[in-house]
Image (cartoon, rainbow, N blue to C red):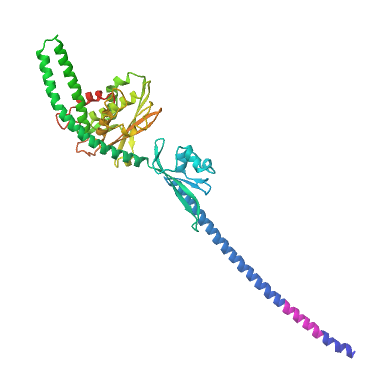
Amino acid sequence: MTNAVRRHPEERDLLHAAFRSFDEAAHTLQQSYCALTARVEQMDLELARSNEALRRQLCDNEAMRVHLDGILESLSTGVLVVDDGGTISRSNRAAEALLGATDAELRNRRASDVLAGAGLGLRDRPQRMGQTVVSISRVPIHNDSGERSGHLILFQDITRIYQLEEQLQRKERLAAMGELIGRIAHEIRNPLGSVELFASMLQRDLDEHSSGKRYARQISQAVQSMDRLLANLLLYTRPTRMARGWHSAESLIDEAIKLAAHAITKVPVDIRIDISREVQSVWCHDGQLKQVLVNVVVNAVQAMPNGGVLAITLSQEPPQALGMPAVRLMVRDSGMGIDPAHRSRIFDPFFTTKDEGTGLGLAIVHSIVEAHQGRIDVESTVGQGTSCSIILPHPSRGGDPDGVQAGTRSRPESSDAHPVEHEVLAEEWSHE
């Protein structure tokens, strides 16, 4: 009994020690669990923050990508993105429009094949694509470390710049020729007057049935024909400045077609006239604008020897065309078109491709349009036809850029300039 009692306290102490050890282990385990839970919560928070930062970065990257895509697609410059192997990996709308293909059709094709198929090449000089003039350049692409990772092929539409350069060169060339022509015309006209005078005197003095009188009449007719040619030359060098006013567009076009009837009736021509409701009248000198229309219409008809469609349209033009409100008077034919080699010379005096032409008609047209502060744009495709656009200022109805009251009838500034005479001269240009 004594031994049992004596052993019991020892076991009890051992049991207490075991419980204490268990409690300490449980406490330690609880602390570790709490620490682990706190760490997991901290890691979850850090992960959430990282995910949020990554999400924001992805959103920013996506927004930047969309923004850059928008910029790329909005560029008027055509862009082809080409890898190191010369294969196209991306294109924008401007390039697709110029090349006549979609992005899907251009991808994974060799850039050199695409350019060759469009008749283009990586050359320094401007190149034509139908009616469009483009310049093509190549720009290398470098990554962050400065290494090359492909290149860009850039297509720049320089049609308007090319046209302006042509116009400037034409103005300089025509100004020099005009000065020379004016001097020569005046020098020739003086002795012609004497020849005409003596030929008239001979006709008066000679017998009606004599051969001499017939020769004198022929001399007089030849002198008059030459005088008309010189009058056209002088009109080209210094188009008669006449007061401008508002004139009915329909009347101008109808009268011009009547004056050009001698050419229109020779071939079957389908005439189509479309006048915009917004443009019922034109600010011009009616006689001079009829000269312009007659000559352009006659040229259009002569370009359709087997007949065709002659379309005359009048519409509003964006102010950017002339830097002021403007209208576009377009004469379009379905004829032979203009040889690209001749296109830059069609307004040069004495340039003609016709056997009976004098090469003055379009030169005078150009001079008259410029006197109206306008311009002429010509687009032509061989075998498909030509469009001649005459762009003229169109001030507000109450406006008066030339110091003439709107609605007044056009009158010559001097007695030498008579509208009827100019209409007769227009007939003489029918061979241009």
Q: Pinpoint residue 91: horizontal percent, then vertical percent.
A: 49, 45
Residue 12 to residue 57: above or below: below
Residue 168's place in the image compared with 289, above or below, is below
The reply, left or right, for residue 308 in relation to residue 215 is right
Image coordinates for residue 79, horizontal then vertical, percent: 46, 46
Residue 428 percent location from the top left of the image: 24, 23
Q: Residue at x 71, y 75 (%)?
A: 29
| Image-quadrant location for residue 162 | top left
Asked if residue 148 lies left or right of residue 410, the reply is right
Q: Quadrant of the C terminus?
A: top left
Q: Is residue 233 magenta?
A: no
Q: Is residue 169 visible?
A: yes
Between 374 and 172, the residue placed more toward the observer is 172
Above or below, 111 against 46 in this view is: above
Q: Main secondary structure of the magenta part?
A: helix
Residue visible at 24% across and 25% down in the picture? 426
Q: Quadrant of the N terminus?
A: bottom right
- The stretch drawn in magenta includes residue 14: yes
Of 292 and 32, the residue lying toward us: 292
**Does residue 76 appear left or right of residue 111 in this picture?**
left
- Residue 239 appears in the figure: no
Residue 24: image location, x then y, percent = 72, 79
Instruction: Read off the magenta span.
Output: 12-25
Residue furthest to the bottom: 2
Using residue 250 as the reference point, say whether residue 411 is left or right of it: left
Q: Residue at x 31, y 38 (%)?
A: 166
